[in-house]
Amino acid sequence: MIHTVYELHEEGSLPGARLITYIQDASDSMAIGKRPLVLVCPGGGYARTSDREGEPVALKFLAMGYHAAVLRYSCAPARFPTSLLELAASVALIRKNAEEWSVDSQKIIVQGASAGGHLAASLGMFWDENFLAEGIGLTDSDHELLRPNGMILCYPVITSGEFAHRDSFACLLGDGQDQLREKLSLEKRVNAKTPPAFIWHTYTDQSVPVENSLLLVNALRRANISTEFHMYPKGEHGLSLANHLTENSDGQGVQEECTSWIELAHTWVKGITHDILTVEKG
């Protein structure tokens, strides 16, 4: 396994910003060659990156046959677009090393929970804008290096409007910044180039209301972007895997009916990646 920590030094990056890779070894004795990669963006309200939504999620995807990576992006007092530049640089790094790492460069999926979902979705909306390529030292012709091939969004922060998680936007933008706040209301940024999405949320989420996902799903539908959405009837915010592996230290964070999301996401990824992980015998 290529388990490496890459320190990130984009404009505004804080100490500790890093990309951690979990790249499975290639072998001629195995039918699977190049694998999809899931790049995990933990939540934390843009104030921190959650341990519960980082490595445990990456290792689950790893066990399911993917390559994985975790982005520990810069949070407050870092401001937009620092964390997005770090994510873009990480996707570019993965694509540039795709051949050596046996990564299918057309099957790089960004996954994010809560504010990490906002970050992952932001790349899905803004990957072809010049400020991203230029911000990490690429040319405008390098946009395709930054494009995620799909988004897995878990109870994501999306809107800066009526149903906003206002603390996330305060940490991301600071005071004021009304114009940027409007730009980063992502249900308004969906376009024909937005990648396919898998989204899940709970009806009873009291921190980031389910309307965040509903607004995004409606926008994706209007733009004819392939989308799978699951709304579970019960569950608090920040469930991560929703099982004992990511249970909070206070005993919260387990919701049995929500544990199915990652298997559903696995099936979704196989669908958009032509079943690369399934080897038919006979």
Image (cartoon, rainbow, N blue to C red):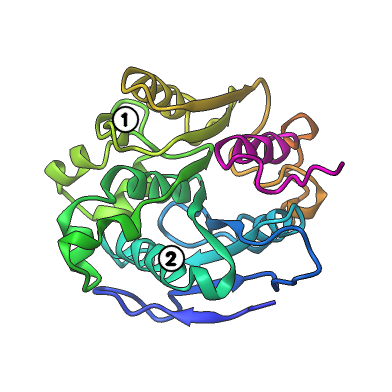
Q: Nearer the viewer, mark 2 or mark 1?
A: 2
In the image, 46: left or right of 53?
A: left
Can residue 266 be seen by looking at this rendering? yes
Residue 265 part of the magenta segment: yes
Q: Residue furthest front?
A: 282
Q: Which secondary structure lies at badge 2?
A: helix
Amino acid type of disc 1? Glu
Q: In the rendered image, which residue does mark 1 sit on? A: 187
The one of 141 and 53 positioned closer to us in this rendering: 141
Within the image, what quadrant is residue 62 found in?
bottom right
Query: For the residues marked 2 and 1, what is the alpha-carbon distance in whole angstroms?
Result: 27 Å
Q: In the rendered image, which residue does mark 2 sit on? A: 95
Q: Which residues are magenta?
A: 260-282
Q: Which secondary structure lies at badge 1?
A: helix
Q: Is residue 103 above or below residue 160?
A: below
Within the image, what quadrant is residue 204 found in?
top right
Sequence-wise, the earlier of marks 2 and 1 is 2
Dot 1 surroundings within 10 Å: few (below 14), some, or many (20 or more)? many
Report x, y in % for residue 29. Answer: 81, 69
Can you tell which mark lies on residue 128? Answer: none
Q: Is residue 205 above or below residue 5?
A: above
| Quadrant (top left/top right/bottom left/bottom right) for the C terminus | top right
In the image, 250: left or right of 140?
A: right
Name the residue at 53% across, 37% down: 155
Residue 24 part of the magenta segment: no
The one of 222 and 40 positioned closer to us in this rendering: 222
Report x, y in % for residue 65. Answer: 72, 55
| Quadrant (top left/top right/bottom left/bottom right) for the N terminus | bottom right
